[in-house]
Image (cartoon, coloured by chain):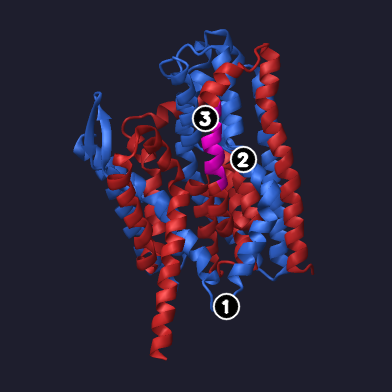
Amino acid sequence: MRTREQHTNEVHRLGRVTNTIAIILMILVPVLFSIKIGVGLNMELFIQHGVPLVVIYMIVCVTEVFAYVPILGAAGSYLSFITGNIGNMKLPAAIAAQESLGVKQGSEESEVASTIAISVSSLVTVTVLTIGLIGFSFFSSVLENPVLKPGFENVLPALMGAFATPFIIANPKKAAIPVIFIIVLQYIIIPVLPVGIAKIVPMFLTFLCVVITVAGSYVMFKMEKKGGSKNE
Amino acid sequence: MYNLLSATTQIQKDANSTFMLIICAVPVAFVLVQALLFFRQARKRGKEIGMKDSDINKAIRGSAIFSILPSVPILLFLIILAPGLGLYFPWLRLSVIGSGVYENLIATTISTGAGFIGFKGLTAEVFIVIMFTMTFAIITSPLLTVIGMKPIIKKVDDLENQKDTFGPHLVPAIFIGLLVSIALPALLPKNVLVNGVAKFTVPWVAIITFISSAITVILLNKLGSNKKYAFLKDFSFPVSILFGMLVAIIVTMISGGGA
């Protein structure tokens, strides 16, 4: 049997090679299309409208990597950051699989469970979208049906109600930290910020919440430790 | 409704051409292979460390069922993006790497910035700028995994193994922060434009949906802890999500769509 280190090295090798190929293939799409239709990238337009978005998203991407990698593990992260839809799909799928098997977060079993869940979830998303592409007219009429539309528009609250509530109930003190932070940010801080900055801040919400929760949990940990040593 | 036959401008025709389909299908197919490779590797490792086949199959079945419903709203973004960008490029972006919100925001910001209302009448130049911006904007995450994943994972592992320090509490804290940051914003009252006028609106449908699926999952898990009803635990997530969506439909109908 391979050691955990040997397995981890294989995961990194597979992740690096496949993600590099996937990145190249994705960059090739606009390049090849541009060549095919004979219209080059208008640098003036790109610098004026595209580059500011690219810069903002680059920073968001960096912060998201640091926020998600510790939860998803190596294999799960390599795959999740290529397949996208992490918060609304890959993260819940990974945690749901860990929960259903009753494995401890951080253990090898939990890594296996989350990698399987993220792989399967990626396959399902691509399949659903491809079916949607083939039967576009039919699905657009179903999804835009005024009776059914509210159901599809509220998948995220439905998903998070089912997924997040048990964890929030189990950790009320820790969960209170980001809840208070988001409320303060939305109703007190953002309204007084210049419009340009106020529009960008929500894009960093995930990272800011993680930082604030970690900082608050650290303070709580120190206080509990101090209280514990006083009692001893 | 969008129809391929309604593509009138040259760029719309090009965006829906067989060439575009092929260049988009290649990365999609590659990512499918990538997912299968990771799946095979994880399954092999699971067997090596003594995980039962039944557990592995449970993880496969559970995540397949779980992933169907959240995939459907992504189709909504395909419907939003298709009139301007054609079918195939949004299909690529939404199938792999992107997320509906990001992709839509980039496309809308650029088309509006370039002077268009929505995606109507986009020129080839703007279309190309949107394609490059979408591609480069979100490529940073996978690029960073290629460059920096190993040291990040090593650092996290080291921290988790430090007993009597904050290290082992780090990942649970990150997790709670992530959960709340994803769940809460959709439930908070905010200003919404109604007929061009900003109106402070409480998202009652989203709140009631959240509470309904939360109660359902708690009840199903509680029932599932009884051996007789253990099967309920396996389906608690999809059933709760489905019930939440059903509640959203009913509440909207009762409130006349204004909630």
Say if A116 sits above or below A150 in the image. Answer: below
Binning the other alpha carbons within 10 Å of mark 1 as few (below 14), some (14 to 19) or many (20 upward) gives few
Specify whether disc 2 shares its chain with disc 1: yes
Q: Dominant secondary structure of the magenta stretch? A: helix
Image-quadrant location for residue B17: top right
Mark 3 falls within which chain? A
Say which element carries label 3. Answer: helix
Expressed as whole percent of the image width and height from the top left, the position of residue A214 reads 46, 62
Residue A227 visible at all: yes
Q: Position of residue B70 (x, y in %)?
A: 47, 44
Give the CA distance from mark 2 to mark 1.
Answer: 34 Å
Pick whichever, A180 or B15, lies toward us. Answer: A180
Q: Are marks 2 and 3 on the same chain?
A: no
Mark 1 belongs to chain: B
Inspect the image, locate mark 3, and give the three-letter code of the amino acid beneath it.
Pro
**At which x and y percent is residue B52?**
65, 68
Residue that mark 1 sits on: B163
Q: Nearer the viewer, residue B242 or A228?
A: A228
Image hue for chain B: blue
- Say left or right for A65 vs A32: left
Quadrant for the C terminus of chain B in the image: top left
Q: Which corner quadrant holds the N terminus of chain B?
A: top left
Q: Position of residue A216 (x, y in %)?
A: 41, 64
Q: Residue at x 40, y 44 (%)?
A: A155
Quick check: is A144 in the magenta stretch? no
Q: Amino acid at mark 2?
A: Thr
Residue A52 bears which disc, if any?
A: 3
Identify which residue is drawn at 45% across, 38% down: B73
Give the colour in which the image draws chain A: red
What residue is rendered at 42% in x and 81% in y? A226
Q: Which residue is mark 2?
A: B140
Residue furthest to the left: B255
